[in-house]
Amino acid sequence: MEATGVSGPHGEPAVVNGSLDAVIGSDLDGDPLWTARLLVSRPDDLVKAYQDYLSVGCNVLTTCTLRASVQALQEHLSISVSEAEDLIASSVSLARRSATDMPRKLGADDRTHRKEAPRNFDAKSVRVVGSVGPYGAYLYDGSEYNGSYADRMSVDELRDWHRPRVRCLARGCDLLAFETVPALREALALVRLLREFPGARAWLSFSCQNERLTAKGESIADAVRACLAEDSAGQLVAIGVNCCQARRDSYTDGAIPGAP
């Protein structure tokens, strides 16, 4: 993994892709694997969806692995551990292919007089970010929205559960995204796990009840401080929130220590 921050190589703002299933037109509501299923069923459509985002200025591609833990892939696709690991790794390769094949797409756009894509596209400027969702997303029982499972699992147990997917993603992506984390205990597990991959960097985002509390009901400010204290090697490049209903600034205004 290349040590990198969130911004582009020349300091340009990071523009992350949006929904993949919405662009592809697939209905994945109710699917426990969500967009990870497309790695098997429609990989070429995933490439096209990524390229649609790249064509309008996106420079950060997130893998479709939010719910793709090794355990979930085994159970819902009836595959082996090694096959599940290969599938997770393929999500990184597929995102990279989307960027490296863009010049070919640009040539096709020119030949058909389409002017969607930027002429100065540079595949090397695109960051691939490995998406890691919470344990509750695997349980698929709604607990990803309240973090209740953290009451019965230790930090080390959560760290051990996340390790296989993080290992698969860290080998090839530029950055990891620990996303939609509802509870401090799980966030600490992920930060602790990150230390096992010295070359890795990650951003961490909490899901929240409101401007002050995580989805588990813990102070966002205290959670951020605890994660920063755990990050002794300085591998976290950003901490924030997602799956929130209020304005972004209502969360960062005093809730997150040091936020602008």
Image (cartoon, rainbow, N blue to C red):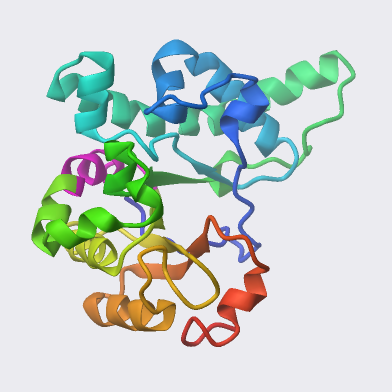
Please state the horizontal and vertical placement of residue 194, each as a whole percent of the image. 23, 60
Q: Is residue 56 above or below residue 247?
A: above
Q: Residue at x 83, y 14 (%)?
A: 111
**Membership of 118 in magenta stretch:** no
Please state the horizontal and vertical placement of residue 197, each as a whole percent of the image. 20, 57
Q: What range is drawn magenta here?
A: 162-173
- Residue at the right extreme of this rendering: 113
Please state the horizontal and vertical placement of residue 106, each as a whole percent of the image. 74, 25
Q: Is residue 55 above or below residue 133?
A: above
Residue 54 or 108: which is nearer the viewer?
54
Q: Residue at x 36, y 49 (%)?
A: 144
131 on left or right of 196? right
Please state the horizontal and vertical placement of residue 54, each as a whole percent of the image. 66, 37
Q: Is residue 146 above or below residue 95?
A: below
Q: Is residue 109 above or below residue 204?
A: above
Residue 154 or 7: which is nearer the viewer?
154
157 on left or right of 85? left
- The answer to whether residue 11 of the structure is visible from this angle is yes
Residue 148 or 27: which is nearer the viewer?
148
Q: Main secondary structure of the magenta part?
A: helix
Residue 246 or 230: which is nearer the viewer?
246
Q: Residue at x 30, y 41 (%)?
A: 169
**Membership of 165 in magenta stretch:** yes
Q: Residue at x 27, y 15 (%)?
A: 77
Q: How many tags in the picture?
A: 0
